[in-house]
Image (cartoon, rainbow, N blue to C red):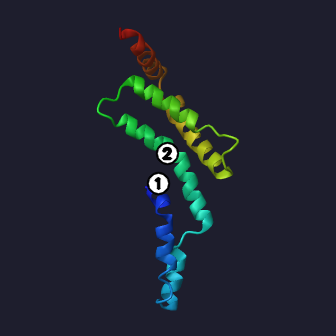
């Protein structure tokens, strides 16, 4: 959804700016309050950047045959994607840090050691069982 909004940004901005001349003062105020500021567009872009790995993970796990080995790969990939980088903006680093804290809470603190080991074993043994 964020991707579509960002791709259609020129259309969204045109919708709110080109139609203003024919409106009453009250309608202009209402319409101007609904427009996105440059800071809003930046935040939307940052959210898109941070949430794209989660969308890809959801698509991978929503396939026809999700497996434990795929789950381990997805968990590891999300952890790597949400580690902060020097090139990330301040907003992106904050969003990634918050997601990583929640992710660690649910997948490291709340997941039993047995579940983690089952995922690891299925991931690494799968490749050795196929001739």
Q: Do the residues labelled 2 and 1 touch (CB within 8 Å)?
A: yes
Q: Is mark 2 on a helix, strand or loop?
A: helix
Residue drawn at x 53%, y 29% is 108
Mark 2 or mark 1, which has the lower sequence index?
1
Residue drawn at x 34%, y 29% is 66
Instruction: Estimate how packed mark 1 is, as few (under 14), some (14 to 19) or many (20 or more) residues with alpha carbons within 10 Å.
Output: some
Front-lying residue, 19 or 2: 19
**Residue 52: which numbered mark, if any?**
2
Measured as percent of width and height from the top left, residue 34 is found at 51, 74
Find the residue positioned furthest to the right.
86
Question: How far is mark 2 from mark 1, CA to CA?
Answer: 9 Å
Instruction: Estimate how packed mark 2 is, as few (under 14), some (14 to 19) or many (20 or more) residues with alpha carbons within 10 Å.
Output: some
Front-lying residue, 109 or 76: 76
Measured as percent of width and height from the top left, residue 41 is found at 57, 62
Q: Dividing the image into 4 quarters, which one contains the C terminus?
A: top left
Q: Dividing the image into 4 quarters, which one contains the N terminus?
A: bottom left
Is 111 above or below relative to 11?
above
Q: Name the residue under label 1.
A: 3
Residue 104 seen in the figure: no
Corner quadrant of residue 80: top right
Q: Is mark 1 on a helix, strand or loop?
A: helix
Front-lying residue, 16 or 50: 16
């Amino acid at each position: 959804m964020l991707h579509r909004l960002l791709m259609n940004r020129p259309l969204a901005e045109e919708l709110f700016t080109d139609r203003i001349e024919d409106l009453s003062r009250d309608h202009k105020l209402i319409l101007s309050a609904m427009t996105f500021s440059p800071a809003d567009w930046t935040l939307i872009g940052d959210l898109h950047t941070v949430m794209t790995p989660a969308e890809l993970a959801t698509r991978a796990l929503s396939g026809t045959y999700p497996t434990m080995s795929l789950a381990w790969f997805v968990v590891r990939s999300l952890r790597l994607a949400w580690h902060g980088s020097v090139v990330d903006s301040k907003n992106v680093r904050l969003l990634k840090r918050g997601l990583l804290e929640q992710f660690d809470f649910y997948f490291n603190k709340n997941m039993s050691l047995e579940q983690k080991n089952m995922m690891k074993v299925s991931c690494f043994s799968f490749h050795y069982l196929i001739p």
